[in-house]
Amino acid sequence: MPQPAHPAAINGLTLAQAEVIAAAALAKGHEMKFLPLTVVVLDAGGQVKVIKREDGCSILRPEVAMGKAFGAMAMGFGTRELARRAQAVPGFTNALSDLTGGRAVPVQGGVLIRDANNVLLGAVGISGDTSPNDEICCTAGIEAAGLQADNGDPA
């Protein structure tokens, strides 16, 4: 008989939390009348917990949303800060792209998920509308799950 996962094998975010984040993020997009969105939620190990792609999204949106979440996880801060660094030091961004095989997307819309003790649980990336609007939906989803959004702005 299969054994349940050992508690140490759980990488931060639960599936239930990830589902709340994705659903609330999409609901925020509807409320704000944004373009169709794709949401990717990663756990603290960088593994996919949830991907939701709304009808009407273009075909590359899942990869862009994944790149935003991956970029935040890879650097340890939200992609708002990564976007600032990309403008200030483009050589670093080129190196980051090379090092990650092009998987990190340095624009707003990738937000780290933290618990009340500031423990990193994962990241959410959204693509579909403007990058600032994508970030609004990330934050709404994270907060709906009772967690803390870290978009990369200094505390």
Image: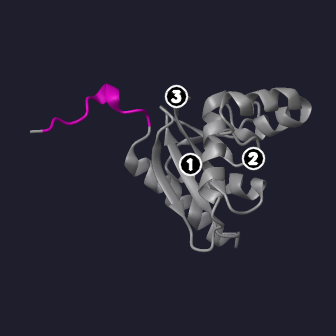
The numbered disc on residue 108 is: 2
State which mark lies toward you, 2 or 1: 2
Q: Horizontal placement of 148 versus 7: left or right?
A: right
Magenta residues? 2-12
User: Cα distance, mark 1 to mark 3?
Assistant: 14 Å
Q: Could you say whether the residue bearing mark 1 is in a helix, strand or loop?
A: helix
Q: Which badge, 3 or 2, is on the more N-terminal residue?
A: 2
Quadrant including the C terminus: top right
Which tag, 2 or 1, sits closer to the chain's start?
2
Q: Quadrant of the N terminus?
A: top left
Residue 76 location, x and y as percent?
64, 28
Name the residue type under label 2.
Answer: Gln
Please tell me the numbered disc located at residue 44.
Answer: none
Which disc, if any, is residue 142? 1
- What label sits on residue 119 in the rendered view? 3
Label 2: which secondary element: loop
